Amino acid sequence: MVRITHHRIKCIGCGYCEEAAPYRWRMNGDDGKSDLIGAKGKKEIYTMQVTDDELEANLEAAESCPVNIIRVESF
């Protein structure tokens, strides 16, 4: 399993995460920040678990984030 954590409040809306994994990330039209599709959040920190087949694309999303607000952990 893979856990993805997104600190949305610090997002600058660059869109790299959506480019890396468009099935998991979407730019929000209201505020221009990215949304982690399917995640549950509390105080602008969103977390979800996904299957191992999403690891590589979401690691790319995390590595390309210029403000380092995406964490991807495999467990």
Image: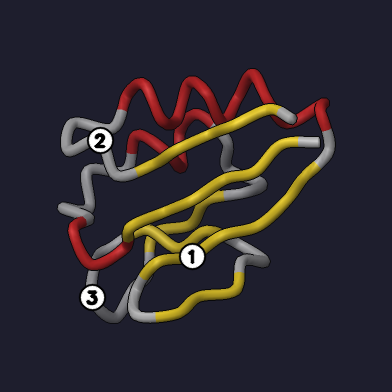
Q: Is residue 4 left or right of residue 66?
A: right
Location of mark 1 (residue): 46
Are circles 3 and 1 on residues that touch, CB within 8 Å? no
Residue found at the very far front of the displayed protein:
75
List x then y, in percent, for residue 30. Answer: 29, 81
Whole-angstrom CA distance, mark 2 to mark 3, is 19 Å
Whole-angstrom CA distance, mark 3 to mark 1, is 16 Å
Location of mark 2 (residue): 68
Q: Amino acid at mark 1?
A: Tyr
Are circles 2 and 3 on residues that touch, CB within 8 Å? no
List x then y, in percent, for residue 58. Answer: 56, 31
Classify 10 Å Cα crowding around label 1: few (below 14), some (14-19), many (20 and above): many
Q: Above or below — where is 42 with respect to 65? A: below
Residue drawn at (52%, 51%) of the image: 25
Q: Quadrant of the C terminus?
A: top right
Whole-angstrom CA distance, mark 1 to mark 2, is 14 Å
Q: Nearer the viewer, mark 3 or mark 1?
A: 1
Say which element carries label 3. Answer: loop
Mark 2 or mark 3: whose residue is earlier in sequence: 3
Q: Nearer the viewer, residue 59 or 3?
A: 3
Picture quadrant where residue 21 is located: top right
Numbered mark located on residue 75 in the image: none
List x then y, in percent, for residue 63. Answer: 36, 21
Q: Quadrant of the N terminus?
A: top right
Mark 3 or mark 1: whose residue is earlier in sequence: 3
Q: Amino acid at mark 2?
A: Asn
Q: Nearer the viewer, residue 35 or 30?
A: 35
Location of mark 3 (residue): 31
Picture quadrant where residue 55 is located: top right
Are circles 1 and 2 on residues that touch, CB within 8 Å? no
